Amino acid sequence: MRMLMPVAALAALLGGPALAQTSGSPPPGSTQVTHATTVADLAAMCAPRSTGLPRLESIAYCQGYVTAAGHAYAELVPASGPRPQIVCMGTPGPSIAEAGIGFAAWAAQHPEHASEPALDGLLRYARATYPCAAAPRAAR
């Protein structure tokens, strides 16, 4: 419980400005996505079509987003905690680049989730790609 409050406070501080954004979609006439609001936005940043500095910025944003989401999940749902895990990556897990590219490929295969919040889609991808083994049922 001690760790939950600081994590929740940090999420509120970091998420506030993001929630104030109306969309991560590019402005009219631009193809560069600059904020990941939806699954489609994050997928575009994880597999950018741009070149040069905009491409590097997109990849850095994607990798930072994936890293932060992974750390937040690990803190909120630790393997030894009381809540069952929904994502089990194993050791070693994928690289940050592999996770970002994998998410973008998953998003392309699941366009029905394109308008959902980016974090929801990232967790859907992780759960589908790195499922946990079913816990054995207790004998009666």
Image (cartoon, helix red, strand yellow):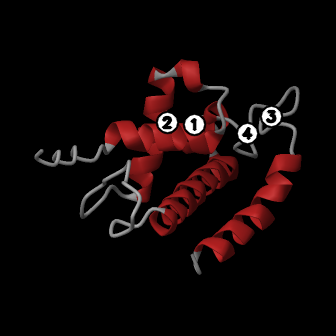
Tell me where residue 26 appears, x and y as whole percent: 80, 34
User: Which residue lies under the disc numbered 3?
Assistant: 26
User: Which residue lies under the disc numbered 1?
Assistant: 43
Q: Amino acid at mark 2?
A: Ala
Total numbered labels: 4
User: Which residue lies under the disc numbered 4?
Assistant: 33
Tell me where residue 44 appears, x and y as whole percent: 61, 36
User: Which residue lies under the disc numbered 2?
Assistant: 104
Secondary element at image label 1: helix
Q: Do we see residue 47 in this rendering?
A: no
Query: How far is disc 1 from disc 2 in space, using C-alphas?
Result: 4 Å
Secondary element at image label 3: loop
Question: Of the residues under marks 1 and 3, which one precedes in the sequence?
Answer: 3
Q: Nearer the viewer, residue 115 or 78?
A: 78
Question: Of the residues under marks 4 and 1, which one precedes in the sequence?
Answer: 4
Question: Of the residues under marks 1 and 2, which one precedes in the sequence?
Answer: 1
